Amino acid sequence: YCKYAKSLVIGSGVTSIGTSAFRDCQNITSITIPDSVTDIGASAFYNCLRVKTIEIGNGVVSIGNLGFWGCSSLTSLVIGENVTSIGSNAFRNGGNLNTITCYATTAPSISNDTFRGVKSNGVLYYPAGSDYSRWLSTYSYNLGYYKWTGVDVLAEEVILNCKYNVSTSNTEI
């Protein structure tokens, strides 16, 4: 029971997060799911009201129905490269969600209600050349319904994240 827990560390040996595992952990502010996890069960993080950021590791393949339903303080979501399906209402009522970064080159399958109730005018970042039109459609409650913008620039991120040590005496790079 985690009603009063403020932080959550999921060990690298964990391979699955079961149904309702962290349901109603209302004081947790961030969730990082390690690459060892392959699936997130239904309602696993249901009603975690104060979660602001979620990072889903590259090992995760599926996110269950209602997985993160009611994370109403959520502002930023990162989805790893191997997710293939995201269940119905998985991020429903993520009212402050305004940035999603998804590294999957093939857009994970979603339902019409996966993102129902998110903030308007958010931005979805995804790999260059990938087709996220289903996510961005205006049909039902997809991201386009909420006037989200898609930006396919993740291929360039590898370059943008490089760090250079340049001395002030260099005149060319």
Image (spheres, rainbow, N blue to C red):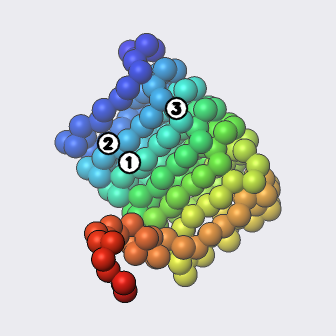
- Label 1 vs 3, first from the N-terminus: 1
Residue 132, given in percent of the width and then of the height, sits at 62, 70
Given the image, on which type of amino acid does mark 3 rest? Val
Q: Quick one: quadrant of the N terminus?
A: top left
The quadrant where residue 58 appears: bottom left
At a point 73% along the width and 58% down the height, the residue shown is: 148
- Label 2 vs 1, first from the N-terminus: 2
Q: Which residue is tagged 2?
A: 16
Given the image, on which type of amino acid does mark 1 rest? Asp
- Label 3 vs 2, first from the N-terminus: 2
Q: Which residue is tagged 1?
A: 39
Give the foreground label among 1 and 3. Answer: 3
Instruction: Pick out the residue farthest to the bottom.
Output: 172
Residue 43, given in percent of the width and then of the height, sits at 51, 34
Q: Which mark is residue 66?
A: none
Q: What is the C-alpha distance between the residues marked 1 and 3?
A: 19 Å
Relative placement, left or right, of 165 versus 73 is left
Q: Which residue is tagged 3?
A: 51
Q: Is residue 159 above or below residue 83?
A: below
Residues at circles 3 and 2 in contact by the CB criterion of under 8 Å: no
Residues at circles 2 and 1 in contact by the CB criterion of under 8 Å: yes
Q: Is residue 126 above or below residue 66?
A: below
